Amino acid sequence: MKRDFLHVTDFTADEINATFELAKEVKARFKRREDYKPFKDHSMAMIFAKPSARTRISFETGFFRMGGHALYLGPSDISIGKREAVKDIARVISRYNDVIMARLFEHAHVLELAEFASVPVINGLTDYNHPCQIMADMFTILEHRGHLDDLKVVYVGDGNNIVHSWLRLAQRLPFHFVCACPEGYSPDAQTIADAKQAGLSQIEISHDPQRSVKDADIVYTDVWASMGQKDQAEERKKRFQGFQVNEALMAATGKESLFMHCLPAERGVETTDGVLESKTSIIFDEAENRMHAQNAILLKICGKA
């Protein structure tokens, strides 16, 4: 049966933990420069409605290193949902390729793509969520801490697609998650309700970043205005005053908390150079692990693991 990875919740807790183990194994193979080619003679179509540095580089490089060919389809190549119907694109690309990765604006588009594609579809990001990023994030936390026990993650900023993925992960793995955001910028209400209803993790939505970060193992942030919201950037800078992750906020945790950011960062806006370059910043390990986590996900949904 065809498998897609559109939300973190498409995997069970056991599958998520197995994916972390597989990512660790594949990462070690890459470091040893092993001749590891599970995707020999396979092709992956990468549909980009939203451009991205890390997503393209990590998927294309990772798939190539595993023996496959990744085909980049930029915003002007398809204009998905505009020049051609999503369901038509899904069926055409499936005739040529073994797997599809899509980085899109509309979440409905990735759902429709998966519905009509006859090959596995992996979500490289939508306006609603970013499941590959959160898998890489938790894998990175596991690497640095050695375990996921008694974990408190505090996200400071906009209740965006990153937060939705954290809330979805909280339905599969137990941890304490706090989203500290300005009023009016909370994450999707249904996603919050689903995370709480699962009864696995402690979930908080706060508007007080200073109080929220106390005892945090991880302090996480993202840009205040995502792609497609840049016209709101100046207004958001005013509304997000007090939500910058700076040295004072990191000190307010009361412990040596790790700092994470999915990148790209606007230095001096949502966080400072000092925090980004600090010894507790693990942003580049996090960025590297996008490739290893995604490789493991691809292996799982394509029946190679």
Image: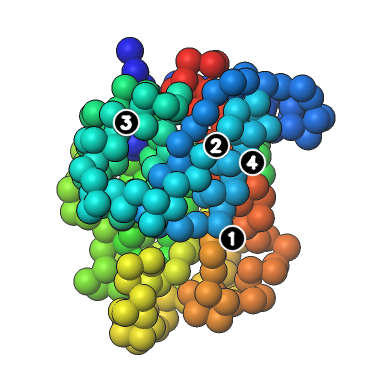
Q: Which residue is mark 4?
A: 61
Which quadrant is the N terminus positioned in?
top left
Q: Position of residue 167 (x, y in %)?
A: 33, 46
Q: Earlier in the sequence, mark 3 or mark 1?
A: 3
Front disc: 2 or 1: 2
Q: Earlier in the sequence, mark 2 or mark 1?
A: 2
User: How far apart are labels 2 and 4 at the CA level?
Assistant: 8 Å
Compared with 155, 59 (above or below) is above
Kind of element beneath mark 3: helix
Number of residues whose C-alpha sits closer than 10 Å to that of mark 1, classed few (under 14), some (14–19) or many (20 or more): many
Q: Earlier in the sequence, mark 4 or mark 1?
A: 4
Q: Nearer the viewer, residue 281 or 116?
A: 116
Q: Amino acid at mark 2?
A: Ala
In the image, taking residue 273 as reference, residue 118 lies left or right, namely left
Q: Which residue is mark 2?
A: 70
Q: Quadrant of residue 97?
A: top left
| Residue extending farthest top | 1
Q: Quadrant of residue 116?
A: top left
Number of residues whose C-alpha sits closer than 10 Å to that of mark 3, classed few (under 14), some (14–19) or many (20 or more): few
Front disc: 3 or 4: 3
Q: Position of residue 274 (x, y in %)?
A: 66, 76
Q: Indicate which disc residue 92 carries.
A: 3
Q: Position of residue 205 (x, y in %)?
A: 29, 59
